[in-house]
Amino acid sequence: MSFSGNVKEELSHQIAQARHCQIAELAALISMCGAVVITPGEKYRIKIHTEKIAVARKCFTLVTKTFNIRTDISVRRNLEKGSETYMLVIREHEDALRILQATKLIGEREDAYSALHIVDPILVQQPCCKRAFLRGAFLAAGSMSDPNKAYHFEIVCTTVNMAEQLRRMMCSFSMDAKIVARKKMYVVYLKEGAQLVDMLNIMEAHVSLMELENVRILKEMRNAVNRKVNCETANINKTVSAAVKQVEDIRYIQQTIGLDKLSDGLKEMAILRLEHPDATLKELGEISDPPVGKSGVNHRLRKIGEIAEDVRQNKED
């Protein structure tokens, strides 16, 4: 199962203690993947359609636990794709009416199977209800990428009004949620790893949160090691390049004016560098007689380089 599937499986078992939170979560599920059906006799029915068994299980549990209402569930299998779809139907008018009144969705209809575009703000006034609503919205229409590959959290909405309502709800928990249009849908999304961790905490998916944190720690450790290795490699390359240039300058002086033209200190350092081309500045200083500090070695080699450059310019002139 994917990481997103694991999150939904965990959330499907997370039942809020308070009834008002259960109603808020059910309102999200009906709004995001449900429809209100009006029969010819002006009777209400509620249909919830999903491809995720975790969502079907959660809807069934909430309707049964919160309202003590019987729900019909049908399963349709697609043999070609190897997938299943689940349909939950509240057929009795009185039962559907009770749910719609409790979730304050009774006025959200245009015709049969019409989408529900937004929920009453009264339903999600309290932080606990907002958590429950976001949990239901993610179950119904959300997804998360594999954190080993990328950090991405999104909830797909059919209308910009619902997307904006979700964005404001997420931002009330200090999230930096954004909206992007995708074909005819509107996607509310988060990108940063730290915010994904916070979002899992908000939805109370604590097991998935720990899994994500473990991935983040490992990735940060790998990145830190890679940065250190890259830095050390760059320093080694820089040191090797400098040593190669120093040897070239010394050999040039040796072949043109001769090392005897150098002062005693510079001549000694030139010979040491030729004898120890791979030695660091510190190591060259330690084998000098008398020993010389790292800055002293650097000064002498730089002076040798300047002399070599002067000789080259004089040759050109």
Image (cartoon, rainbow, N blue to C red):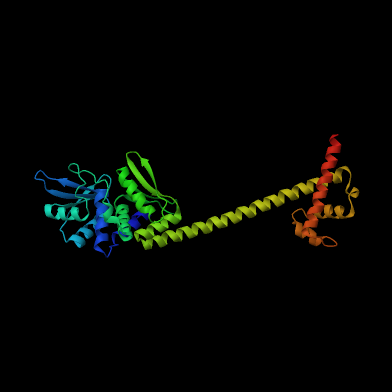
Tell me where residue 165 appears, x and y as whole percent: 32, 49
Q: Is residue 226 left or right of residue 104?
A: right
Tell me where residue 70 appears, x and y as whole percent: 15, 58
Tell me where residue 258 appears, x and y as whole percent: 89, 46
User: Could you tell me which residue is drawn at 57 percent across and 57 percent down?
Assistant: 225
Image position of 124 with respect to 253: above or below: below
Question: Looking at the image, can residue 156 be seen?
Answer: no
Image position of 305 with respect to 172: above or below: above
| Frontmost residue, 255 versus 298 | 298
**Quadrant in the picture for the C terminus:** top right
User: Could you tell me which residue is drawn at 83 percent across and 60 percent down?
Assistant: 288
Q: Is residue 51 left or right of residue 296?
A: left
Tell me where residue 64 appears, x and y as whole percent: 19, 60
- Count the marks: 0
Q: Is residue 156 left or right of residue 253?
A: left
- The residue at the far left in this view is 41
Question: Looking at the image, can residue 19 be seen?
Answer: yes
User: Could you tell me which residue is drawn at 27 percent across and 55 percent down?
Assistant: 122
| Frontmost residue, 23 versus 151 | 23
- The residue at the far bottom in this view is 17
**Quadrant in the picture for the N terminus:** bottom left
- The residue at the far top in this view is 317
Q: Is residue 287 left or right of residue 206?
A: right
| Frontmost residue, 264 versus 20 | 20
